[in-house]
Image (cartoon, rainbow, N blue to C red):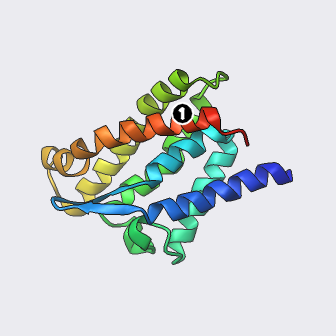
Amino acid sequence: MEARRLTKMALLTALLCVSAWISFPLPFSPVPVIALTLVATLTGLMLEPKDALIVFLVYILLGFIGVPVFAGGTSGLTKLWGPTGGFIVSWPIAYTLLSICKGKSRSFFSYAWRSIAITIPVVYIFGVAGFMLVTGTPLWAALTAAMFPYIPGDIVKCLVAAWLATKIKI
């Protein structure tokens, strides 16, 4: 791999790790609000699909082996098998799919609608399913606790990431 490509991958991996520490809980849900989803969207928009997949697999591997890179500085297998594990597992799929489908045009509108239409549904399908499996929560309660309150913020994060991706030249 060329140095520039590896540098982009390393930088975005580091940003994912740091952004996960920027989180805050909501009183009614074990799923925190995290800045990582903004950086994850940016990663999908700025990297080629193979590189995006590698970045997310490295990120998950770091968390799995105990490096505190998950939301709020957590890590470990118990986090992957916890109520938010489905969200974490969805990221390599959702953001690699975004990278595949982002198109050739580096336009804000193109990036924004693709980010919203691709990543949000994929992340929530895996996330809510994992939440339901782990907590035993019925569908409507899981949607209320782990999805509905987060959608407006995720849309805003997709818009910010789309704007950043059109402005950053790396």
Expressed as whole percent of the image width and height from the top left, the position of residue 58 reads 61, 62
Where is residue 22, by image quadrant? bottom left
* Residue farthest to the right, as pictured: 2
Q: Where is residue 5 in the image (x, y as percent from the top left)?
A: 78, 49
* Residue 167 left/right relative to 80: right
> Which secondary structure, mark 1?
helix
Q: In this view, does 89 lie above or below 159?
A: below
The quadrant in which residue 31 appears is: bottom left
Give the side of residue 131 with respect to residue 126, left or right: left
Tell me what residue is drawn at x 42 percent, y 28 percent.
117
- Where 72 sits versus 6, above or below? below
Give the mark count.
Answer: 1
Query: Looking at the image, which is closer to me, 125 or 36?
Result: 36
Left or right of 15? Residue 141 is left
Q: Please, which residue is most extreme toward the bottom here?
A: 66
Q: Nearer the viewer, residue 42 or 138?
A: 42
Mark 1, Cα crowd under 10 Å, few <14 / some 14-19 / many 20+, is: some
Where residue 17 appears, x then y in whole percent? Answer: 54, 64
Is 39 displayed left or right of 21 in the figure?
A: right
The residue positioned 73% from the left and 43% from the top of the image is 170
Q: What residue type is labelled 1?
A: Trp
Residue located at (44% from left, 66% from top): 21
List the residue tagged with mark 1: 163
In the foreground, 12 or 52? 12
**Residue 137: where, in percent of width, then height?**
16, 55
Residue at 20 percent across and 45 percent down: it is: 143
